[in-house]
Amino acid sequence: MSDTATTTQSIRDFALAVRTALSDLPTDDVDELTDGLEADLTEQAADVEAADSAAPDFELDDPVAYADELRRAAGLPVRGTDAPARVPWLRRQRTRVGALRAGATRRIRSSAAGSQLLDFMLVLRPLWWVLRGWVVYAVAAALLGGAISTVPTDPLRWLVLTAFVVLSVQWGRGRWLPWRWLPGFRTVVSVCTVLVLPMVLLITANQTGAQNSAYVDYNPYPAPGLMQNGEQVTNLFAYDADGQPLTDVQLFDQDGRALNVVNDPANTDYLPQLDAVGEQDMVVPSLLVPGGSGWNVFPLRLVTSADIDYTYDLLGQAHQADAAPSPFPFAQVRPLVPVSEAGEPTPSPTPDPAPVPTPEPSASAAPVAEQ
Amino acid sequence: MDTTQLLKGVLDLAVLAVIVDEDGYGYDIVRRLRAAGLDEVGDASVYGTLRRLYSAGALSSYVVPSDGGPHRKYYGMNPHGRAMLAEQRANWTHFADTLSQLLEKPQPSVSLATIGDNL
């Protein structure tokens, strides 16, 4: 009884070991080969016991040899002697592609020009290997590194790129392919590389272009806040209908935003402005708006170059205490004329739009601006 | 002569021959072959051969559950198998006849020198 149980167990183990030895075959093949194996072995064991003879063939000690005998008789490749018949379809395709390639090579070689071209391309193969390594690196960097950087930006990335290139070149030379599936994998990688290559090149071109233009456009000074005809406006001067200068005029744009002459009014203390002789004055915001954001109250006040403190740094410090009202460009301008009094619709008899007085600003402006 | 080597070449024929009249499962067929005198036939060889003949379309197959034990896979002949058997039988007969005739021909006597002969 216990003997039978032992036999049953050992048969089960043996059958399992045989299946394991066949495990490189497709599941269908394994099933077909071993379906009913337990039943057969059990019956055989019973036969041997009944005959009570020296069991001639019934040995459960070498499942691998048993599996090999099954394979040989079934016409399947024995493990380790041939490429596995794991994916026969794939193998067929590979054979077909190989034949196609051989045929194509023969056709190209049949003409002298084709032969020369092929030789030339063969010389370029190492270049392709390097390119393949680089593309694989770029894809890996995009997938794993987050940012798409086709050109390494730090030593670690350079190291990774080098590793990929070396691997690709070794693959190209037929080295470093320890597993049987690797040559196929290499083909897959190559095909993917060809597909991805245009995109990687495009990205690289864009990045290089962006970098170059970034260098060209690099400007340590912030972009100006207010422009007229491409030049920075550093101050504004308002005159009323009678042509008299106005002070402390608050200006806003069409969207109701303060019309500032600087980009970041809250954090800008002064704005450089060249005077007539090229000295650098500083324009400062009005103190009438709390928080230093009085950059839209015109005219802005001025710290002249003489009062700028260059003691602590080369850029100089402008102090509000030194600020004085900016001199108006004109003491006064032409008063406005109502349309009804303008008379004839013919062009104005004085086409010269220039203000009446000649500019002699500071003297006449001084009395007006007293803050 | 090692009969297992001879058997390898004709195992298909032998298996087809013992299965032609009655379906059988793996070990059943091994048993028939051994009963017919092919004592040295390996069971794994027979199972593999059955599988190959089945893949080649010469056999049909079906599974029969057995009482209490593991199920059995039966194989049976189909027309293609019969045709194959007929062809292989003809081939074998022709081959065996040829070889028999070859062996029955009087062999040219080879005179061997025996020890003590004076040459």
Image: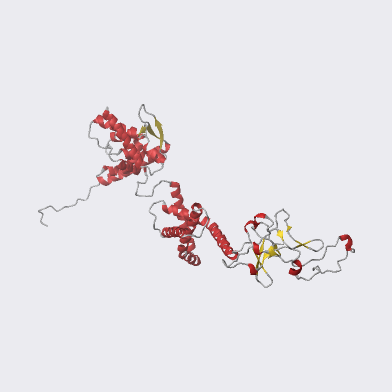
Q: Residue furthest right?
A: A344
The image quadrant where one finds the N terminus of chain B is top left
Q: Is residue A22 left or right of residue A157?
A: left
Q: Position of residue A232 (x, y in %)?
A: 68, 64
Q: Is residue A352 left or right of residue A146?
A: right
| Residue A45 appears in the figure | yes
Residue sitting at x 75%, y 66%: A365
Q: Nearer the viewer, residue B50 or A136?
A: A136
Q: Is residue B48 above or below residue A329?
A: above
Q: Is residue A57 above or below residue A177?
A: above
Residue sitting at x 25%, y 46%: B103
> For residue A237, which quarter of the picture?
bottom right
Q: Residue furthest bottom?
A: A277
The image quadrant where one finds the C terminus of chain B is bottom left
> For residue A307, which quarter of the picture?
bottom right
The total of numbered circles placed on residues is: 0
Q: Is residue A318 left or right of residue A125?
A: right
Q: Position of residue B66 (x, y in %)?
A: 37, 28
Q: Nearer the viewer, residue B106 or A96?
A: A96
Type of colouring: secondary structure
| Residue B13 appears in the figure | no
> For residue A350, which quarter of the picture?
bottom right
Q: Nearer the viewer, residue B40 or B87?
A: B40
Residue sitting at x 36%, y 37%: A34
Q: Position of residue A335 (x, y in %)?
A: 83, 64
